[in-house]
Structures are given as structure tokens and as C-alpha cells.
Amino acid sequence: MSKCDYRTASRPRSPRVTNAIICRSARRQAGDSWALDIAAHDWKLPVGLPLQFNRLESTAIASATGIEAKRVSGSLYGGSFSGPVAVSWKSGWSVAGQGRIDGVDLEPIVALLKREVAMSGKLTARPSFTSRARDPADLLNALHLDSDFSIEDGVLYKIDLVAAAKNPLSRQAGKGGKTEFDELKGHVLLDQRAYEFTDLQIASGLFRAGGEVNVNEDNTLGGRVSAELRGTAALISMPLDVSGTTADPSVFPTRGAMVGAVAGSVLMPGLGTAVGIKAGELTERLFGRRKKDKPKNSVLRQDETRRGVGSETKPKG
């Protein structure tokens, strides 16, 4: 943190300092702590994910062992954020906090996280997060995050869910292309660079889909999505297995749906395909299916994460 510059604080019309945190005022508190009023403009996070902030403001209490901000607020990538954050370096490094994110452009942030993932839209989220590491550069890799989220007016690239639902007998129908959506919402758990997306719901015009998807540390995918497309004649309902990698995702009807589709097409060409798919999906629900494998680097169970996230604990020595 830079030394307090009182001249900058007393002259708001002076040229703006960029790419640095400015301490606008500092007041000594009881013991060795200080109350700080800090701000930054056009500043990039120096460790972990290199997020670029247009504006950053906070009042915080700093001591020899850490800093705690009851509220940090600012703007980045066309949106805003706010929330409390606490950082400790007493024994190793630890970070804990909560946030309110509104209207942030997702595409440049996704590029920083996983460059082979392509998604756009405006993000709204309410994350809680914790991280502990011996070195500050390792805090991102040790991040635990738990959040509901919503993405509006977006595009999911490299996969076409509508085409996959329309063409159940083609393995290539859903590959490539894109899925445009009005809204995509759900819940995400992140642990050790593996993601678990649950309660997913995606909507765009006559298209609806929902399900769950896991992104493992090695970027492999797993999960299931149920897609529905209402046409002029009937409702197409298609259960899809998600596989492949983030660079080359794949969606294809489940085994039960495929068996039903083939049987229905043979017995009743045209209408029979949709009927067979529905029958196959019902059979899977009645008799069950093999429980999906957990991610190779499994995220925390939701109840464990929610108990641990948002409450700072002392880092291990």
C-alpha cells in the first residue's frame, strides 16, 4: 500500500493517479491499528486473477497482521461490486469476504479464468469466498467460492443446445455453433479450480433447459441437461449428457433417450422419435441410472461450503 498522500486528498481536481492505491487519510486507533480511507483508479489486481478496476474505494482498519474493510466498492468491466473483505498475513495469508456484483461484462473475466471457455453476457452474483495459502500468489489456486448467479443477454459458444435437441440422432448436431440466451441462472461452487454448477436454468424464446454441469481441474466436463424446445406442432423434450472438455464440449442424448428415439423412429417415423425419446426418459427415471462420477477434484459439498464460506478462519501455520 502506498504512503498516504494528503495533497492528493485535499485537491480533488488535481490529475488522477492511476495504477496505484492512494491512501487519502489515516487515523491512528487504539493499539497499533489505523483507520484508512483508500481509493484507486484504473488499477489492476497485483496477485491472483489480474482484474482491472476502473474505480476502487474503501474504508478499512489496518494492523501489523492484516486489514479488514467493512465495505469495498468500485466498478469494473461495465458493472459494479461492493462488500466486506478481510485479509490476514499473521501466519501465511488468508482472505475472506462477500460480494454484490451487478451488470459486470462476463466475457473478459471468463478469458482470464479459462481462455478456452467462451461466454458473454452481463453477470449478477452474490458470492461468498475464502482462501488460505502460504504465499499470496497461491491464493487464487486455493479459492473456495459459493454463489448464486444470473447472466443476461448472453451467448454460450462452442455448443448448440437447440440443434442438439432438434437432432437427437446426430452426434455432431450440438458441437460448435452457439447457444444464445435471454437468461442463464444457477448456483456455482468452486474449490481447488474445479467448478460445480447446479440448479442451472437457461431460457431464450421458445427454448428452455435446466440441469447440472461439472468442470474438473483438467477442464473435462460432466453432467446432464434437459432441453425443451416448443415448436409449432409439439414440444420437443430432450435429456442430454454433457461431456468432452471446455475447449471441445459435447452434448448428446442420454442412452435411454437414444434407445427410445431409435425405436420410435423405426416403429412410427416422424412423431415416433419424440414419443420414443419421452418413453426412454421415463424408463430412466423409473429404473434409475448409474450415479454420475464425482469430479476428479471434487468441489466441497454444498452444506460444508456454506458453513465455511464467509467466516474468516485463522490460516494454518
Image: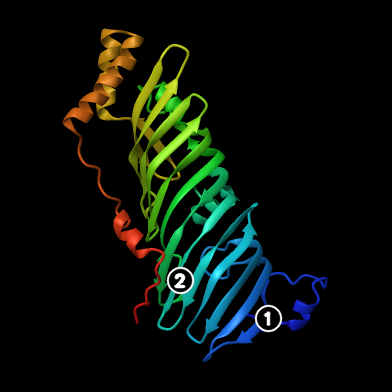
Q: How many residues crowd around disc 1 within 10 Å: few (fewer than 14), some, or many (20 or more)? A: some
Amino acid, disc 1: Ser
Residue at 37 percent of width and 28 percent of height: 171
The residue pinned by badge 1 equals 25
Q: Is residue 298 visible?
A: no
Determine whether label 1 and label 2 are within 8 Å by CB: no
Q: Position of residue 246 (x, y in %)?
A: 43, 45
Q: Position of residue 94 (x, y in %)?
A: 43, 74
Place residue 23 in its image quadrant: bottom right
Q: Is residue 239 left or right of residue 137?
A: left
Marked residue nearer the N-terminal end (1 or 2):
1
Labelled disc at residue 95: 2
Residue at 61 percent of width and 56 percent of height: 80
Place residue 163 in its image quadrant: top left
Q: What element carries label 1?
A: strand
Q: Position of residue 175 (x, y in %)?
A: 44, 32
Q: How many residues crowd around disc 2 within 10 Å: few (fewer than 14), some, or many (20 or more)? A: many
Amino acid, disc 2: Val
The furthest residue to the front: 30
Residue at 56 percent of width and 49 percent of height: 106
Q: Position of residue 228 (x, y in %)?
A: 40, 25
- Indicate how the structure is coloured in the image: rainbow
Q: Is mark 2 on a helix, strand or loop?
A: strand
Residue at 53 percent of width and 56 percent of height: 100
Q: In this view, does 187 lie to the left or right of 254?
A: right
